[in-house]
Image: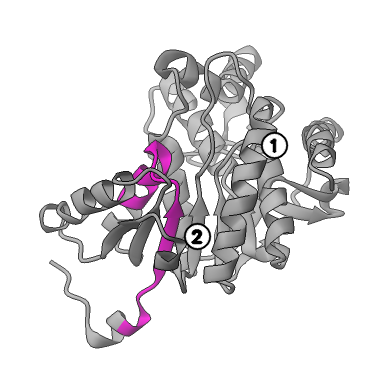
Amino acid sequence: MHVFTMEEEVARKKISVIGAGNVGATAAFLIAQKQLGDVVLIDIVDGVPQGKALDMAQMGPVELFDAAVDGDLDYGATAGSDLVIITSGSPRKPGMTREDLLHTNANIVGSVTENVVKQSPDCIIMMLTNPLDIMTYHAWKVSGFPSHRVVGQAGVLDSARFRYFISLELGVSVEDIHALVLGGHGDTMVPLPRYTTVNGIPIPQLIPEDRIEAMAQRTRDGGAEIVNLLKTSGYYAAGASLAQMAEAIILDKKRLLPCSAHLTGQYGIDDLYTGVPIKLGGNGVEEIIEIELTEDELGFLQHSAQTYREGIALLGY
């Protein structure tokens, strides 16, 4: 069992998760388990964040972690957070698109962001609420933060889904598969088979084109497939993706991950948040990586980003 030294106690980070529903609770659970820092769960339903936090804390002796886990209704408990993860919002129901949630969740995200900034003016904000790319832009505008301190979780989850479907197709371990899915976290996302490999071998050398497209489409529909089965949004893979990004930030790992970041001309896209490869570290979005794309791939990425332009305009930007 790891026992924190005095130096580690001083350096321990604070991660707040706003929204103690399925996704937020899963992310908090994994962040505590990884001992990335002390965790605070915030929700509007009295008893939910407190109860889930207490339950997680009592798991510590079993899973051998010392991270403190607390739950509260008051944003004061989040004061001084290094990282704030926003999962608050209405989940999708069957038949709903991510864009259907626009106005409902914009109101929630705006209020949450104002409270977060008041308590933790130096934090990094990580967005999960859908429609993801629009809500990340909205949080950036409301916060007044520099764009490198506001990032959206998109491509990590989408790439994980693509990797899983490829592993099923080939009958190989997911550990050997690296995938890249760019664009918005929605129906226009852009899986890139040329940059998706199995132990270094691009998948077009291993899988017929029609099967790759079928898996790419299942990836695009991955969230809706779970919603139709579960009658609400999925949360295990999304929570794990948040935890992976949190680890990159808290431990300053400089991971190269596909995330929703603010573009200022990269890939011919200006003043939009969309999924691109970034270097994610202690300062948030430390670099936007511009990879070589074919004319078609670039066109798909630009189209994906532009689909969110209208939603941003509806919010008054």
Instruction: Specify whether 271 is left or right of 8.
Output: right
Q: Is residue 75 magenta?
A: no
Q: Secondary structure at mark 1?
A: loop
Which circle marks residue 84 in the picture? 2
Task: Between label 1 and label 2, give the one nearer the viewer.
Answer: 2
How many labels sit on residues?
Answer: 2
Q: CA distance from mark 1 to mark 2?
A: 22 Å
Residue count near mark 2 (Cα–Cα under 10 Å), binned few <14, some 14–19, many ≥20 = many
Does the CB distance between marks 1 and 2 fall below 8 Å? no
How far across and how far down the image is residue 226, in percent? 46, 20
What colour scheme was applied to this rendering of the protein? Answer: one colour
What is the quadrant of the N terminus in the image? bottom left
Quadrant location of residue 105?
top right
Q: Earlier in the sequence, mark 1 or mark 2?
A: 2
Task: State the extent of the magenta-drawn residues as a range.
Answer: 10-29
Residue name at image x 65 percent, y 56 percent: 278
Residue name at image x 72 percent, y 67 percent: 146
The one of 283 and 56 positioned closer to us in this rendering: 56
Amino acid at circle 2: Val
Amino acid at circle 1: Gly
How far across and how far down the image is residue 258, in percent? 61, 47
Residue name at image x 38 percent, y 43 percent: 45
The one of 178 and 299 positioned closer to us in this rendering: 299
